[in-house]
Amino acid sequence: MKVRNYIYILLAGIVTLASCKKSFLEEENPTAVAVESSITTETGMLTAISGMYTSMKSYTLFGRNLPVLGDLLADNSYVSITNSGRYLTENNYTYIATASEIDEIWSQAYNTILQANRILYASVPASDNVNQLRGEAYATRALVYLQLVNLYGQPYTVNPSAAGVPIVTQPTYTTGAFTKPARSSVSAVYDRIITDLDSAYTLMPATTPAIHDANSNFLSKYAAKAIEARAYLYKGDYANARDAALLVANNGGFSLAASSSAFSAYWASATNRTDKLETIFELNMSSTVNNGYNGLDAIYNQDGYGDVLCTDDLYNSYTATDFRKSLILDGTRTPYQAYIVNKYQNVLQSDRDEVKVVRYAEVLLTLAESYAQLGDSGEALTYLNRVAQLRDPSLAAYTATGTTLVADILNERRKELAFEGYRFFDLTRTAAVINRPQEGAKSAASIATVTTANTRRILPIPQVEINANASITQNPGY
């Protein structure tokens, strides 16, 4: 996790505090400060929260690598034969422990965790504002650990006793010496995730206090509960996944776009939400702080690199009347016909696309899957059809039960959450063979079938981390 780089100094906040509105998120270059004394007031904590969000939005984490790999390692996308050299080993499952993306995700994830730990360890008197900020730090730490344990460890549903990732819950300066933790079990990491999310939900008020605008760029009480629903779903704990998702659905006040025009406008917008439409939490990419050509938009959009394309199979899974099909363009990636991802439309604009991290449709589909797995087909169909028929007004209602119903829900998750980084985890947690469509001459070298025995369904621990920490063990096959 390269904690060695963060013992004495960490990125502090990076904002001008003249405003807590959009300008709050338009960070300037960070200044390093002594961490022991950097967070002693509510204002200092707010500054540190800004630094934590900036760490999350890096292209090495949620700003590109995580959402891209969540689809590329599955069956939703592939790398064009005409490319900039990015994600080629991931496209063909030939990555090794020294691969740059493998190291970048790990390093930036632990940087974000350490930022959250600084906030949680700070001695600032409790208040509504401070509780809100601490809750955001708990939720962030949990969200990052959920990504880490599902990339670098076996799925909980496959082997909860397997080696997960190291758990770090304090700033390194509190230990008195350099800490080199071993990997905790997958189940222990999940225990930490759930505990953190429960703490976040308990701490944060239902109404976001004045320290923030009530907008989608900040983690909220119900964002924490939505992440918890995801964590329980990934565990295969369907009763708790249902209960967490129901809290969001019944009390969060979120809604789905009710028409084709509203849906299109939602995805075309680069502005955060204050109306609770579709988005529960997203990362701001402003005109002053964004990932430039390294952003998520640029890897898909042909005005950027445009390397990563939609598979023919996914495109053909949408009917002609499905609103979501409009987010994939039938175009050309010279010299071949290609299906181009158009979810991120504001590439290289003055204000860039927000990176969606938690959306309401995911919560509803979690409800559908949880009810189906618990044997309540009626409730499962209610939530499944609520999403599917709203997106596709011509679609006949789903009516299946049992395993067919679960397959229908997973298929709707594939279509709804495409290019947002979920598909790979859905396939690994259900222990499914990953059948990756072959695009012929259009694609760079690509593996066709990823069986459950393929060791590269789990990423390697970065070699640089193993070199620095003798307590860390490598995953099999690397």
Image (tube, rainbow, N blue to C red):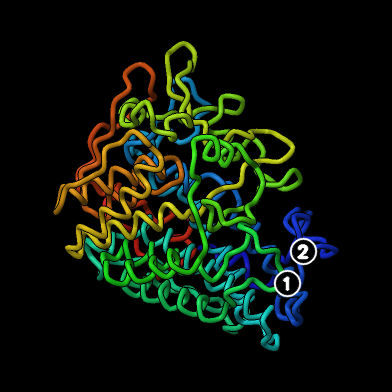
Residue situated in front as seen by the camera: 417 or 171: 417
Which quadrant of the figure has residue 7? bottom right
User: In the image, is residue 40 above or below residue 353?
Assistant: below
Residue 21 lies left or right of residue 122; in this view the side is: right
Q: Is residue 233 left or right of residue 81?
A: left
User: At x 76% / y 46%, what residue is drawn?
Assistant: 288
Name the residue at 49% across, 35% down.
Answer: 260
Q: Residues within 10 Å of mark 2 (few under 14, many from 20)?
A: some
Percent coordinates x, y for residue 439 in the rendering: 33, 22
Residue 101 rendering spot, x and y as whole percentages: 48, 45
Q: Nearer the viewer, mark 1 or mark 2?
A: 1
Q: Quadrant of residue 147?
A: bottom left
Identify the residue under disc 1: 210
* Local SS, label 2: loop
How many marks overall? 2
Q: Is residue 280 above or below residue 36?
A: above
Residue closer to the observer: 335 or 241: 241
Q: Amino acid at mark 2?
A: Cys
Closer to the chain start, of discs 1 and 2, is 2
- Residue 274 vs residue 292, the one in the foreground: 274
CA distance for labels 1 and 2: 8 Å
Residue occupied by mark 2: 20
Q: Is residue 38 left or right of residue 152?
A: right
The answer to whether any part of residue 215 appears in the image is yes
Looking at the rendered structure, the kind of residue marked 1 is Ala
Indicate the position of residue 53 as horizontal and vertical percent values: 63, 60
- Extreme residue in the left direction: 402
Q: Secondary structure at mark 1?
A: loop
Q: Are the residues at dot 1 and dot 2 in contact (C-beta closer than 8 Å)?
A: yes
Query: Which residue does the image show at 70% across and 85% down from the upper left?
Result: 124
Q: Camera-side residue: 312 or 379?
A: 379
